[in-house]
Amino acid sequence: MKKEEATEKTEEQKKIEELTDTLKRLQAEFENYKKRIAKEKSELISCAEEELIKKLLPVLDSFEQALKNSESKDFVKGMELIYAQLFSALKEEGLHSIESLGKKFDPYAHEVLMHENSEKEDIVLEEFQKGYMLNGKVIRTAKVKIGKVVKNGKTGEADKSEH
């Protein structure tokens, strides 16, 4: 009878250990699930912010154009204030403009619309439309004109004359 009791206890202990292991695994899986859901939620919010800001960028562009083409000082002050408020709100959300003018061409941050003869190769000479980054990610490339070095009448070709 003692052997049967000992066998029952070891079986009960094995069952308890199995259930304990199962419980620990379920707890770990649940913790991983909570972390994954939190990460997905954060990514979803980031995507939603990105879409909103993309929709607002044309408004920002319109303000810039209006400020460039206005004559009245009161109009300019009002437009500058609105532009500053809008840009400040977007900046708080992680938006930053890409500095382009005078910088080296970066295919990830710039879209080349034109080339112009220049003394410096692949330097941004003019910015047609600003580019923007949101939380370190390019959401719109800057539309630019870059310089190309002209040698011997042809862009980018070296002198092939004999010495």
Image: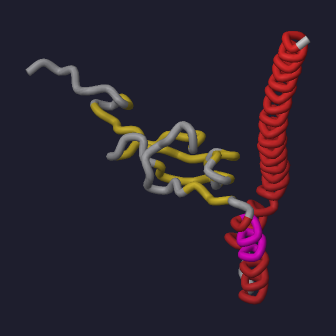
Q: Is residue 43 above or below residue 77?
A: above
- Image coordinates for residue 89, horizontal then vertical, percent: 76, 70
Residue range of the region highlighted in magenta in the rendering: 83-90
Q: How is the image coloured?
A: secondary structure
Residue 71 relative to residue 155: left or right? right
Residue at 76% over, 76% down: 85
Residue 163 relative to residue 157: left or right? left
Q: Is residue 99 visible?
A: yes
Residue at 77% over, 70% down: 86
- Image coordinates for residue 106, horizontal then vertical, percent: 50, 41
- Image coordinates for residue 88, horizontal then vertical, percent: 71, 72
Q: Is residue 132 visible?
A: no
Residue 134 relative to residue 25: left or right? left
Q: Majority secondary structure of the magenta segment?
A: helix
**Residue 92 placement: quadrant:** bottom right
Q: Is residue 70 above or below residue 141?
A: below
Furthest residue in direction front, as rendered: 1
Depth order, front residue of 7/143? 7
Residue at 87% over, 14% down: 2
Q: Is residue 65 inside the magenta stretch?
A: no
Furthest residue in direction left, as rendered: 163
Depth order, front residue of 63/115? 63
Residue 68 relative to residue 107: left or right? right
**Residue 1 placement: quadrant:** top right
- Image coordinates for residue 7, horizontal then vertical, percent: 85, 12
Q: Quadrant of the C terminus?
A: top left
Depth order, front residue of 35/139? 35
Q: Is residue 142 above or below residue 8?
A: below
Q: Is residue 89 inside the magenta stretch?
A: yes
Depth order, front residue of 42/150? 42
